Amino acid sequence: MILGIETSCDETSVALLNDQGEVLSNVVASQAIHELYDGVVPELASREHVQKMLPVLDRALAEADVGLDDVDAIAVTSGPGLVGSLLVGVTTAKGLALARDLPLLGVNHLEAHALSPFLEARDLEPPVLVLVVSGGHTLLVHVKALGELEVVGRTRDDAAGEAYDKVSVMLGLGYPGGPELERLAKNGDATAFDFPRSWLEPDTLDFSFSGIKTAVRVVLDRDEELRREPRSRDVAASFQAAVVEVLVTRTLAAAERLGVPSVAIAGGVAANGALRSAMETACRETRRRLVIPRLAYCGDNAAMIAHAGKLRLDRGERSDFSLDAQPNLPLGDVPNRAPSRKKRPR
Amino acid sequence: MSASRSIVVHTNGPEETQAVGAAFAKSLTGGATLSLEGPLGAGKTVLVRGLCDGLGVTDAVTSPTYTLENEYATDRGTRVIHVDCFRLGGPGELEDLGIDDRRDAATVVVVEWGDRALAALPGDTIRVTLTPDPGEESRRRIAILVPAGVEIPGLGGGEES
Ligand SMILES: Nc1ncnc2c1ncn2[C@@H]1O[C@H](COP(=O)(O)OP(=O)(O)OP(=O)(O)O)[C@@H](O)[C@H]1O
Ligand SMILES: Nc1ncnc2c1ncn2[C@@H]1O[C@H](COP(=O)(O)OP(=O)(O)OP(=O)(O)O)[C@@H](O)[C@H]1O
Ligand SMILES: [Mg+2]
């Protein structure tokens, strides 16, 4: 059984996976306090992680109906993320692994997102093209093998979730505003505004969302009525249509170019219904398989960390106790790969 | 001691704003702090991209809104710390990022939405305000306010104030 810990941003999460890789529990405590502040407060975030870590750990064990004695390995997000927040998870994981003489696995948060489609879709096999789309990231990841990931496209400016959140703020919906903006868009006319789709150069698989953010501001500045319902619905729907079109078109273009038969979406924005249904249609038309993890595994969660850690463990990899928070860890870099060590007989 | 000066330029399109950033970089000395101000989509990140170019950063410059800060090494052994206060509640939270501990002669600090945390920025911070033109989508007014006592070598054409 492997225990996973995630504290890279606002969520404090602990999960347990059994030897078959099934999720026994996945407890996620969000730091709701941030909504009061309109922002993430780094210091506060780490303090909150400290306060929540043990209760969340206890609950994860209770929900899985197991004890720490049943745990055979510890996986933890070591980066990228906020250093103070990451440290809470890394320190907890090192403490547990050291005290109980268990293997420790540092996990790259982005790699965990990119591998999350494999968590439940047991028959899914690489190669898979994964769109990782969240508040902080918009990446196209070519999963060639479970241990071989290549970033083939990324945003050059804002992430898609960031664009959702900024437009949401412009429309007075608060932050983070992805879900609220989607709700507002439901009853809007997606053809009311022709917001720009940034395709960049013909050959690139990169994204750009700063242009559409700016185009929305320009439209709102010209007519204040558009910031309020009912007309804000049309702005939201037209914005969403542009973002979704770019995400889907680029993802399918990448799959086509790389000859990859399966596509997946991961990260917080994968919760978006318009993105899901547009991607479903596009994949059906091109006869590609589409996998979208259930919502609980789309946002930041420890189940995906335990899952990525288990894949590393199964390959015989380990991290050593010099494992540290790595705020800028790029995808593709394995956190602190140490020579594998024989597991203690138990 | 020189008086404070302000320089105003207008740009048409992101390339021109990037060029302003790159040109301004040539006049910057290590240890400088810049506060970039203006509404969503004003072009703060675009300007930083030019600035980084001019300072010798080869990495891609992206929005730091979510990461809160990005650090870039230059090809001259110096570095740029690119911060964003959009998600921060105020000066106290900027202090929590611990930038003051990393400030030195080889570091340029650029802060998007710096006006949200001015109290945590040093007194010699150079304030750059980008204002979109209501009539012209790709036009921006860029005002650079250099405080009294801050020498920017080679920067001519400023209006004394
Ligand atoms: N239904 C939705 N439609 C659009 N965007 C959404 C929706 N639900 C969530 N989001 C966006 O997803 C983002 C949150 O994603 P996630 O939970 O993965 O966290 P994150 O902090 O962005 O993590 P990461 O460190 O992985 O970038 C926010 O930008 C939020 O607005
Ligand atoms: N003259 C100009 N200068 C700068 N950007 C321009 C100009 N004309 C058009 N643009 C466009 O405006 C957008 C500026 O976006 P950018 O993300 O740099 O703004 P920002 O001020 O950093 O926004 P945020 O507050 O979200 O961080 C880009 O899409 C850019 O192409
Ligand atoms: Mg910006």
Image: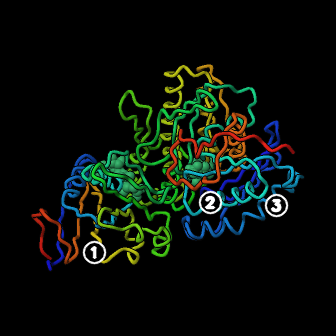
Q: Residue at x 53, y 27 (%)?
A: A252
Outermost residue toward the left in this view: B157
Q: Which residue is mark 3?
A: A58
Which amino acid lies under the numbered mark 3 shown in the image of this protein?
A: Asp
Vertical order, A270 against A180 (above or below): above
- Using the rendered view, name the quadrant where residue A295 is placed: top right
Query: Would you say the residues marked 2 and 3 are in contact, meaning their CB atoms lie under 8 Å apart?
Result: no
Give the image quadrant in which the ligand numbered 3 is located: bottom left
Vertical order, A199 against B5 (above or below): above
Earlier along the polypeptide chain: callout 2 or callout 3? Answer: 2
Label placed on residue B124: 1
Q: Position of residue A44 (x, y in %)?
A: 59, 70
Which amino acid lies under the numbered mark 2 shown in the image of this protein?
A: Asp
SS of the residue under disc 3: helix
Q: Residue at x 40, y 34 (%)?
A: A199
Which amino acid lies under the numbered mark 1 shown in the image of this protein?
A: Asp
**Callout 3 environment at 10 Å: few (<14), some (14 to 19), or many (20+)?**
some
**Where is the N terminus of chain A found, in terms of image quarters?**
top right
- Dot 3: chain letter: A
Label 3 near ligand 1 (CB < 8 Å): no
**Position of A77 compared to B149: left or right?**
right
SS of the residue under disc 1: loop
